[in-house]
């Protein structure tokens, strides 16, 4: 599994701790240093089954600065993917990527169910 996170994010820290406590093996990837590519985001979106809007970090400063709350509805999926791939701080985190699943954001109950814990 790949754990895509921002180390200074408290939710990411909680999720990382949870993964370690549950003895789950993962590779950690800093989203600010290695932003997801356009291709990765499209694949993750498809695997997640979530609306594309769920991939945006709606509580982030960048989201507010770019006024994305109002702009997203007018943007095509392709434009949204390009925006997400341009800056890791716009992307919701953490993201846990497995062979056949993608979890966005940390909700312990969802992670437990998806990982069979």
Image (tube, grey):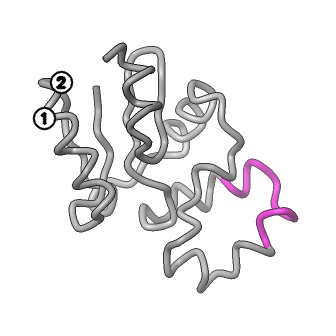
Seen from this angle, which residue lies furthest bottom? Answer: 65
Q: Residue at x 37, y 49 (%)?
A: 94
- Which label belongs to residue 44? none
Q: Which residues are magenta?
A: 71-80
* Real-space Cα separation, disc 1 to disc 2, in angstroms: 6 Å
- Which label belongs to residue 24? 2
Disc 1, disc 2: CB below 8 Å?
Answer: yes
Q: Residue at x 60, y 35 (%)?
A: 45
Figure check: 32 above or below 69: above
Q: Main secondary structure of the magenta part?
A: helix
Residue designated by label 1: 20
Mark 1, other Cα within 10 Å: few <14 / some 14–19 / many ≥20: few
Q: Residue 72 colored magenta?
A: yes
Q: Residue at x 43, y 32 (%)?
A: 109
* Residue 41 rendering spot, x and y as whole percentages: 54, 41
Mark 2, other Cα within 10 Å: few <14 / some 14–19 / many ≥20: few
Q: Secondary structure at mark 1?
A: helix
Q: Is residue 33 left or right of residue 107?
A: left
Q: Residue 89 colored magenta?
A: no
Q: Secondary structure at mark 2?
A: loop
* Residue 117 rendering spot, x and y as whole percentages: 31, 17
């Amino acid at each position: 599994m790949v754990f895509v996170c921002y180390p200074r994010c408290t939710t990411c820290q909680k999720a990382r701790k949870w993964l370690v406590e549950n003895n789950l093996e993962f590779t950690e990837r800093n989203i600010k240093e290695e932003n997801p590519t356009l291709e990765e985001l499209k694949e993750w979106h498809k695997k997640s089954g979530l609306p594309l809007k769920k991939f945006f970090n709606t509580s982030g400063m960048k989201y507010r600065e770019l006024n994305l709350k109002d702009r997203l509805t007018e943007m095509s999926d392709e434009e949204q993917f390009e925006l997400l791939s341009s800056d890791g701080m716009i992307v919701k985190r953490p993201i846990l990527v497995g062979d056949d699943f993608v979890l966005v954001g940390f909700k312990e109950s969802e992670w437990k169910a998806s990982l069979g814990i």
